[in-house]
Image: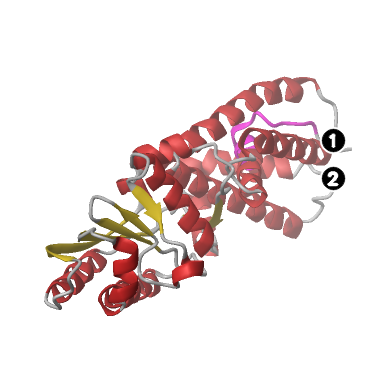
Amino acid sequence: MGVTLPQATVTWSGDDWEKYIAALLGMRYAPGDFFVVPSDDHGDLGMDGVGRDGRIYQCYAPENEPLQPGVRKKKLKKKITDDLTKLVQKQAEHRTILGDIIVERWILVTPILHSKDILAHANAEAAKTRTLGCPYICPSFEAIAVTENEFLGVEKKRFIGSTLHRLNLIVDEVDQGNLDALKQDNSHSDLVGNLKTKLSKLKAVNTPQKLEQLERKYLKAYLEGRGLLTSLQQNHASIYEAAVKAKRGFEKLLEARSSLSGDPGGKRILDELAAFNTQLEEYLGKLLDPETTAVLATEAISYWLMHCPLDFPDDD
């Protein structure tokens, strides 16, 4: 079995997701062409925002992510069915908000969309809605589900840097099988050997069991961080580029410190971890929460131990 990087999932509260998508839509539309529907006044009407072009938007971030794909699919299907039902059942309330707007498209914006079954379900529910004779529903009414990456990608790039919400990415657990695959992978054999050699220099690592435990810890941190970086590269390119730039700059100084410092290995590792984590929080603290920057910092330490910029003499 080959090495598989764990997935990293951004977690959102329902309120934060609504505010985030409303901010992106506010960038897309001209002033006055989009408005938010306050839930405090109107309750849940199956729409969080309205465009005067006939598009209405519902924002939905399922709770308790990361979810199994089947569970997420079930929640999204239910959300589509429930909200399209509300769209035609609460006609008096909708007409008060919509005025003379005719609804041409209902758009569910959600963070993760991994199944084409969701799109098929939205099409089927839209077909039912068209038959109900609702006066503010267009005869060609459509319902779709999208993510902000595909639908609001341009606005998302402009939005990066706002302090409205710091991303918290939850990384999937790395199991023993994946650690074993990494250790047995030919392309990583020298790197794993470097890690083991350096860890064996540490004074605190005085038994084979401690060496094995610490090796597992750093290999796990390496895989978790690589998975997180991959997710950032795919979904948040500007944050990924900033993280890589910070790591590359720190690495240049790290090599100099490794050649000159006489500090014992344990102290070097802890000092460099604290220093790089602090730097990441300064670079990315407005974009990523502390737990996420900590994953990036521990990945970097593992990477540097494996690739040799972080080195030290044997502990006495």
The C terminus lies in quadrant: top right
Q: Quadrant of residue 88?
A: bottom left
Q: Name the amino acid type tagged 1.
A: Pro
Neighbourhood count class around disc 2 (C-alpha, 10 Å): few under 14, some 14–19, many 20 upward: few
Sequence-wise, which precedes: disc 2 or disc 1? Answer: 2
- Image location of residue 98, percent across then percent down: 30, 62
Q: Name the amino acid type tagged 2.
A: Lys
Q: Mark 1 points at which residue?
A: 264
Work out how far the residue at label 2 is from the one at label 1, CA to CA, in angstroms: 9 Å
Q: Verify CB contact (< 8 Å) between mark 2 and mark 1.
A: yes
Q: Is residue 94 magenta?
A: no
The residue located at (66%, 54%) in the rendering is 217
**Callout 2: SS:** loop
Q: Which of marks 2 and 1 is in front?
A: 1
**In the image, which residues are magenta?**
302-313
- Viewed as shown, does residue 145 lie left or right of 211? left
Q: Which mark is residue 203?
A: 2
201 or 264: which is nearer to us? 264
